[in-house]
Image (cartoon, rainbow, N blue to C red):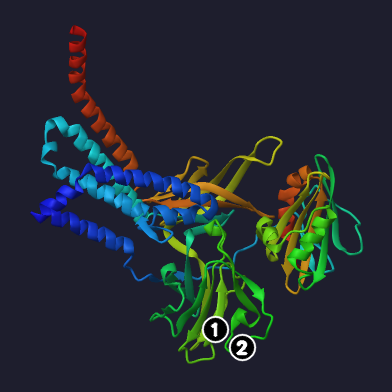
Amino acid sequence: MLIKLIFSILILVFLQSCGQDNHIRTYQLAKTKAPVNKPRVETPEKKSTGFSWTKPGSWIASSGSSMRLASFDVPFSGGMGDLSVIQLGGTGGSIEANVNRWRRQLNLDSQSLFEIEKEMIDYKGGLGDYKIIRIINEELDSAFLCAILPAGNQTLFVKLSADPKGIREIETDFISFCSSLIISI
Amino acid sequence: MRIKDIINFLKQPKIFVFAIIWMMMLVVLGTLAQKDMGLYAAQNRYFSAWITWFWFIPMPGGRLTLIIILINLSFFFFKKSIWKIKKLGIVILHLGGILLLVGGGLTAMFSSEGNMVIEESAQSNHVEDYHFMELAIINTSASSFDEFTIFDQPLLKRNQVLAHANLNFEIEIINYLENCEPTKRNSPAGIQHKGMLKNFMLSELKPEKEDNWNRPGMIYKISNSGTNADGMYGIFLGQPISQTVSVNNKDYTIILRRKRTYLPFSIELLDFKKILHPGTDIPKSYSSDINLIENGAVRKILIQMNEPLRHKGYTFFQSSFIEGPNSETTVLAVVKNYGRLFPYISSIIMCIGLLFHLSQKLPDLFRKSKEKIAV
């Protein structure tokens, strides 16, 4: 009798672990309301090019070059970083081509797409999903923090140039800035 | 006679010895393998599996080995010689061991873990699983509610046909990809391709070491709708624009997402606090001020590192955070473990068993030692 009981329990345990439920569930949920956006701490800056953003308070707008949608001097404990926002039509070239161009600017060898993608970090912001990559040449004491943000039929490239320590200090603000970029009407 | 033979075989202590040695080897192999194949895959291959394949040789996996140990320990009670007051300590010790294994079994079979992501001032009442996906088909036609039909991960496999009374169509899974990326289509799409497949393809990628880095995707065919919604579609995790189809005046949204478990209460994030080590960007501690909302009653609670919230069998740990431009978002790791108390209880029982056994043996030991001195 005891044997039968033990074997019955073991068979039940085995059957349970096999998962006999049919894996289909149904339920109803009340419709969710669209989230209400809280007022921004800083007023977004609007550009005639159709994008707006919220920049950290310490960043200073600079003139930059004509190619740039926006330029900022970014102070950090060891000096001043340079941040540029460039807008290109379509994808603006492949990720591999753009990252390797930046790597060459830092005297680094090119990498394969697989290697590049391993180093890229995905974020979500006002323009949707975007990617950030750190490119550091310790020997030159130079580094870039670059973001590639697809925005409909164009792509924004945000590049921060500083020394490796500066990149680490500014990274959080850089991510906040990239996440704040939106298409303005 | 035959039953007696079986009992005699199953209660042999050498089964326990071999099983425990094999379990130790599995632990070593699994620990080494997780470096290359990732923690989740190693766990599945060596510890959660019934059978582990070494090349073409099947060997007992962790689950089967532990079941063998459990059976062997259970059959220990069939020994007539143990039912004496002298052996009570040993009996209690075995009982503790069995309880530990039962707790492990409950954890393996019924526990779930995932995370809850809440932005400041927002509420959430669901947990997203770390590993399992689900295909959610949401009928959005009603004005006040959405009707969800959920197909769990075990059904999401190639050639599986998904159908339910709630749906006016069938879904046939053409291919399920564990990891994929959407790529721009080089050649024009066929007439059967609908939705994102008109412009994109899903290219299969090698699965990542860490399971939650994968982006699963699926190619599926809608049929028997009797409308022009019939066709071939594609879907992937985190797709920015969800696929919608309209069948017989009913609108459906189709989403591949992490498996959701809805809780009988909600959590509202009031404030997320992060304290850094001075002069660095390294977090010293972070905490979430939350409101636990249940049946209209609101209770304010602080969740911080090493001080989780335990409520209705769920444990909420402060796990991570996301910094946004306007507000912060907390990430709480949520664990439901039915076997949570078993290790504590069984450890106490085993300690009692050992103490009992020791207290019975001590007088003999003292006596022997006195005799030795006398000699």
Secondary structure of residue under mark 2? loop
Disc 2 is attached to a residue of which chain?
A: B
Residue nearest the observer in this picture, B250 or A71: A71
Residue B13 pos. (x, y %): 23, 42
Question: Which part of the image, by quadrant, shows the C terminus of chain B?
Answer: top left
Secondary structure of residue under mark 1? strand
Give whichever of discs 1 and 2 has the lower sequence position.
2
Q: Residues within 10 Å of mark 2 (few under 14, many from 20)?
A: few
- The residue labelled by disc 1 is B232
Residue B18 pos. (x, y %): 30, 45
Amino acid type for the residue under numbered disc 2: Gly
Label 1 close to label 2 by CB (< 8 Å): yes
Disc 1 is attached to a residue of which chain?
A: B
Residue nearest the observer in this picture, B9 or B102: B9
The answer to whether residue A41 of the structure is visible from this angle is no
Question: Which mark, by number, is residue B282?
Answer: none
- The residue labelled by disc 2 is B190
The image quarter in which residue B200 lies: bottom right
Amino acid type for the residue under numbered disc 1: Met
Residue nearest the observer in this picture, B274 or B29: B29
Residues at marks 1 and 2 on the same chain: yes
Residue B89 pos. (x, y %): 20, 32
